[in-house]
Image (cartoon, rainbow, N blue to C red):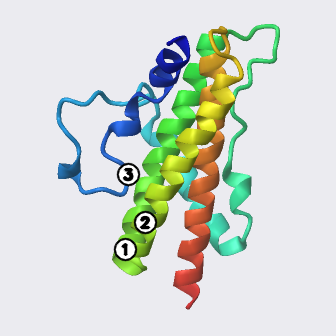
Amino acid sequence: MRQFAALMLLLTGCTATPPYAPASAGAASEPAPLWTGRGSAAGRAGIRACLDRERTEGDLPSCRPAPVRGNSEHSSASLDRVSNWVIIDDWESEMKVTLSWLHANGPADDVDVAQRAWEASMLADVSVYMNMYEGGSHVGLVGSIARAEAVMDRVVFLEKLRRQIETE
């Protein structure tokens, strides 16, 4: 039961409207993910500027910040988890921008299928990491690291797809 509670604490938004779905797809009563609103316009603008520049120059992975891993003497698992929530919120927001562009300019149906499959796989992967620390104080931090890395990797993948469509 603790395993399920910890997973739900981190993944509260897994049943919320996915970033590729129309706004009317989610139920209004579903809770927002814990990281919603943690990011900032400046953070998203920095990511977008880097993605736009590196999509042209070819080094998209360089836009990824390192998630906070809780390995300094001044770390707190809960504060580090919240720092990762900022990364997740900003990058999920930018994923929506890229998905919107792909819907307007690319294979929208294929992108939707792939996005749903990626989300299911990502949530399962995050669970694998979190289950290794069941009941531990670091379970949320581990989950936030796994989700932040997965979201950033996905945005980089989607931006590469965008680059391919732009150059055709």
CA–CA distance in space, label 2 to label 3: 12 Å
Q: Which residue is mark 3?
A: 19
Q: Is residue 166 above or below residue 121?
A: below
Label 3 SS: loop
The mark nearer the N terminus, 3 or 1, is 3
**Residue 18, x across and y down, in percent:** 36, 48
The answer to which quarter of the image holds residue 105 is: bottom left
Kind of residue at disc 1: Asp
Q: Is residue 50 above or below residue 34?
A: below
Q: Is residue 152 above or below residue 15?
A: below
Q: Which residue is mark 2?
A: 113
- The reply to whether discs 2 and 1 touch (Cβ–Cβ < 8 Å) is yes
**Residue 127, x across and y down, in percent:** 59, 32
Identify the residue at the far bottom of this view.
Answer: 168
Residue 120: in sight, yes or no?
yes
**Residue 64, x across and y down, in percent:** 68, 47
Q: Which residue is mark 1?
A: 109
Q: Residues within 10 Å of mark 3 (few under 14, many from 20)?
A: some
Q: Residue at x 47, y 52 (%)?
A: 94
Nearest to the observer: residue 8 or residue 13: 8
Q: Residues within 10 Å of mark 1 (few under 14, many from 20)?
A: few
Kind of residue at disc 2: Val
Q: Nearer the viewer, mark 3 or mark 1?
A: 1
